[in-house]
Amino acid sequence: MSTFTDPYASSRETTEGRVYSVTGGDWDSMVTEIGATKEERVVVNMGPQHPSTHGVLRLVLELEGETITETRCGIGYLHTGIEKNTEYRSWTQGVTFVTRMDYLAPLFNETAYCLGVEKLLGITNDITERATVIRVMMMEFNRISSHMVALGTGALELGALSPMIFAFREREKVLDVFEMVAGLRMNMAYVRPGGVAQDLPAGALTKIKETVKELRKNFKDNEKLLVGNSIWIKRTQGIGYLDLAGCTTLGITGPVLRSTGLPWDLRKAQPYCGYEDYQFDIPTTDTCDVYGRFLIRMQELEQSLRIIEQCVTKLEKLEGQPVMVADKKIAWPSQLSIGGDGMGNSLNHIREIMGESMEALIHHFKLVTEGFRVPAGQVYTTVESPRGELGVHLISDGGTRPYRVHFREPSFNNLQATAAMCDGGQISDVVAAVASIDPVMGGVDR
Amino acid sequence: MSTETSNGMFGVTGSGDTSGFGGLVKSVQSIGSTQRPFGGYFDQVADELERAFPAFSDAIEKVVVDRGELTLFVKRERLFEVAKILRDQLRFEMCVSVSGAHYPAEVGRELHVVIALLSITNNQRIRLEVCVPESDPHLPSLVEVWAGTNWHERETYDMFGIIFDNHPGLTRILMPDDWDGFPQRKDYPLGGIPIEYKGATVPAPSERRSYQ
C-alpha cells in the first residue's frame, strides 16, 4: 500500500480496507494559499454538480483573475451505454432505449432512429401519411418544450427567475399534449418502426388547437420580459462569439450555426417526413453571440406553431387512415388502449389472440419476442433536432437486433465549442455561453 | 461486410435446445462493391475526386452505393490526403461524425472507422470507411482537417480502442480514465444480472435467446 495522501480525500483504515472521504477544499486555507503565491493563475473546477452547468457537465477553468485562459470540458458522468444495450434488444425495443438519450427531445431520437430502421427495411415510402404527419406534429411540439427548457434555464442561470416560471408553464402545456397522445410526458417510445404506437385519441385535435392558441398568447410574456431588456442584452450580447468558420470546422449545427447568418436547417435543406410540404421560415441572426441564439430560439417557437397548425389541418383530412405500416411482418400486432387499469394492450386484441385465432396468437408471439429481420447494410439518417443535426448511424447484419447503433448527438458535438466561446472571456460569461449551446447531458454521454 | 455464415437460431449454445434449429447454417448476405454509374450526385463526387486526386485507385479500396448512400472505403495510409482534398476541393466543409464498428469475423480488418461528411455548399453527404486490423489499430487523426472530429475520435478510441495518430489528446472521454477494455467491441460483454421475479428467473439481456 502506498503512503500517498490525497489532499482532497482524507483516509482512514477500516476492516474493509482503506476508506476515503472526498471533501472540497477549505475555502479559508485556499485563499491563504493563493495569497502566498505571486502567481494569479487559479484553476477552478466547475461542476459536475453545479446548478448552472446543465446537468453533470464538468468545466475545468484556468483563470487569470476573472479572465479565462483555458477551458476544458469533462463529460461522461451520465454515460449509460445505451448504444451497447440496443445491440442486445430487438429493433422495436431499441426505441425505448434511444428515447432516453437526449431526454428533452425524446421524439427526435425516436423519429431519427425509426427513419433509419425504415430506410434499412426499404419501407420509407410505405409509412402512412397520417403517421408521418403525427410524427411531424409531435416533433414540433417537442421543439417547443425543448426550447422552453433552454430559454428558461438559460435565463435562470443568469439570474432571471421569472422567464423560467413562464417557460416551464408553457412546457407543461406541451407535456400535457404528449400525455394525451402518447400516454407519457417524457421518454414515451411513441414513434415505432413502421409508424407510431397509437392513433390520436378522440378530441385530440380540438385540444391541440386550443393549446396552440394559448401558447401563442403566452409566448408574448417571455418576449416582453427578455427581448430588448437592457440587463439581458448586457449579459448576452457579444458573449460566446463563434463565427461561421468556427462552426464549420467544429461541425456545429442548429441555432448556434444559424446565429452566424447561415440558414442551414435540415428540414429545408434535406427534407424528411414530408417537411417540404410545410410553410415555415428559418430564423437567423448574424450576431454570432448568445443574444442571437436566444432570438433564434424565440422565433423558432412561432415557426413550430405554424407547422403544428398545418399538421392539424392535414390530420383532419386524414381521419381514419392507419398509423402503422400495412406489412403485418413489421407492424406491431397490438394497439394500445385505455382500460380500467390504465393504458395497455387493447382488450379486443387480447380477446382475438386468446379466444379466436391461434394464428394471430402465434403471429403476435413471434413478432413481439423475436421481432423482424432487417436486411444487412448501414444507413445514416438525420433530423433537425432543437440542438442541430441529430444523426443515427445504424448497421444491420441481417438479424433481429441492431449490429451497431451510433447516435451523432448535436449536444456532444456542439459542446466542443465551449472552449472557443469562453477562452479570453469573463468567468461570469461561461454560464451564458454554455447555456446558448443548450447541451443535454443525457445526449452528450448516452 | 464479408461473406460469412451464421450457425443456429438462438445465439446461445449449450442450452439444451432440442428444436433442431441449433443445426441451422445460413450464409450471411454481403454487400459487394458497386460499379458505375452510381446514380445521383455520387458519380459527380467520384469524378471530381478522381480528377483532384490522381492516386484515386490506389487510395480507394472500393465504392459502395447502398440505400441511396455513398461509402468510400479508404486505405488508412491515404486517409489524411483524401480528407484534405474532400474538404478543400470538393467542399465537404463539415465532418459531422466519426464512429466505429467491430467485425470480429473480418480477419485483418476487424475494426472499421466510419466518417460522415457533409457539404453545405453542394448539399451532399458521403461516408468514408477505413478498415484497420485489431492487432494494429492505427489510422491518422483528422483533427487537423476538421477540428470537430476531436471528441468523436476520442469517443471512438474510448469505445473501440482505435488509435488516431497525431490526435492532440487521445484520452478516454465517456468511460473513466482507468477503465479496462473497450466496451463497444463485440467480445466485450454487456454485463447485467439475472432478475428474479415471482419465483422465476429472467436471464440478463446478453444471456437471452437472440434469434439470429
Image (cartoon, coloured by chain):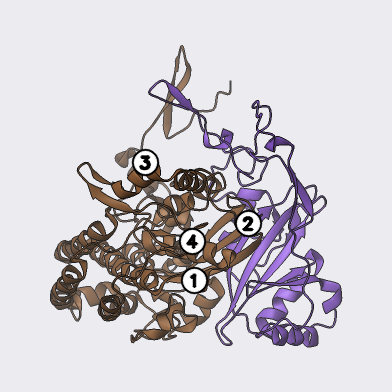
The circle drawn on residue A396 is 2
Chain containing mark 4: A
**Amino acid carrying mark 4 in the image:** Tyr
Q: CA distance from mark 3 to mark 2?
A: 37 Å
Q: Which mark is residue A355?
A: 3
* Disc 1 residue type (three-letter): Asp
**Of tags 2 and 1, which is closer to the observer?**
1
**Residue for point 22% across, 41% down:** A341
Q: How far apart are labels 2 and 4 at the CA level? A: 13 Å
Dot in front, 4 or 1: 1
Q: Residues within 10 Å of mark 2 (few under 14, many from 20)?
A: many
> Label 4: which residue?
A113
Could you tell whether A309 is left or right of B170 in the image? left
Residue A140 visible in the snapshot:
yes
Label 3 in the same subunit as label 4? yes
Distance from disc 3 to disc 4, alpha carbons, whole Å, reads 35 Å
Instruction: Please say if the residues under marks 3 and 4 sit with CB atoms less than 8 Å apart.
Output: no
Q: Which residue is mark 1?
A: A126
SS of the residue under disc 2: strand
Q: Which amino acid does the dot numbered 3 rest on?
A: Gly
